[in-house]
Image: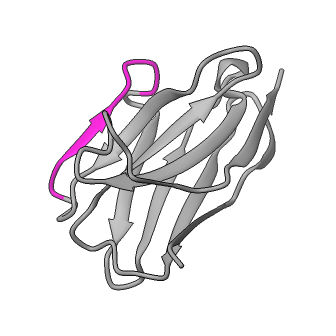
C-alpha cells in the first residue's frame, strides 16, 4: 500500500518557523517529483512548492517565495518544507503529494497536517 505521511505541523506565532516532513512508504518515490499544497478554511487547495526527482529543480508559489524552502532526501524517501517568516495567511492544512507532474496532476496525496499561525 502506497502512503505519504506528513508531520511537523503545529501552532506558531507570526514570524516564526516550522519544518514539515513527508515520509513515503509502500514504494520508492525516488523518480517522482514531489510537492506541497495547502488548503485554508473556505478556500480551494493551492500549490505551495515542488521539487524535481533529483532535487535539482524547485518551484514555488509567489506567496511563499523567499520564505519557504522545499528539499528532499531520496535515501530516506522524505521531502521537507522549511517555512520561515510565517504569517497568519499561511494558516492551512498542508498536504504533500507525488507524481510525474506534481504541480498539475499529483498521483498520490498525504492525509495533511495542520499549520496554525497566530498573530
Q: Identify the residue at image location x=67%, y=18%.
A: 89
Q: Is residue 85 visible?
A: no
Task: From the top left corner, tell me how far across and down residue 83 is, in percent.
Answer: 55, 42
- Where 20 sits versus 59, above or below? below
- The quadrant in which residue 84 appears is top right
Residue 102 drawn at (x, y percent): 32, 45
Q: Residue at x 40, y 77 (%)?
A: 77
User: Which quadrant of the figure contains the N terminus?
Assistant: bottom right
**Main SS of the magenta segment?**
loop
Q: Is residue 24 visible?
A: yes
| Of 25 and 38, the residue lying toward us | 25
- Position of residue 66 relative to residue 10, above or below, is above
In the image, residue 62 lies in the stretch drawn in magenta: yes
Q: Classify 80 as above or below 51.
A: below
The answer to whether 68 appears left or right of 91 in the picture is left
Q: Magenta stretch containing residue 83, yes or no? A: no
Which residue is at the far top? Answer: 42
> How many callouts does the rendering have?
0
Q: Residue at x 47, y 59 (%)?
A: 80
Residue in the image at 27% along x and 74% along y: 30
The span shown in magenta is 56-64
In-image side of 100 versus 94 (left or right): left
Amino acid at each position: 500500500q502506497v502512503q505519504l505521511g506528513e508531520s511537523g505541523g503545529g501552532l506558531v506565532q507570526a514570524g516564526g518557523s516550522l519544518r514539515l516532513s513527508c515520509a513515503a512508504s509502500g514504494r520508492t518515490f525516488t523518480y517522482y517529483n514531489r510537492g506541497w499544497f495547502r488548503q485554508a478554511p473556505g478556500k480551494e487547495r493551492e500549490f505551495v512548492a515542488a521539487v524535481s526527482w533529483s532535487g535539482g529543480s524547485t518551484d514555488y508559489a509567489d506567496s511563499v517565495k523567499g520564505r519557504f524552502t522545499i528539499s528532499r532526501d531520496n535515501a530516506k524517501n522524505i521531502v521537507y518544507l522549511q517555512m520561515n517568516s510565517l504569517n497568519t495567511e499561511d494558516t492551512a492544512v498542508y498536504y504533500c503529494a507525488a507524481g510525474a507532474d506534481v504541480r498539475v496532476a499529483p498521483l498520490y496525496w498525504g492525509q495533511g497536517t495542520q499549520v496554525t499561525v497566530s498573530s
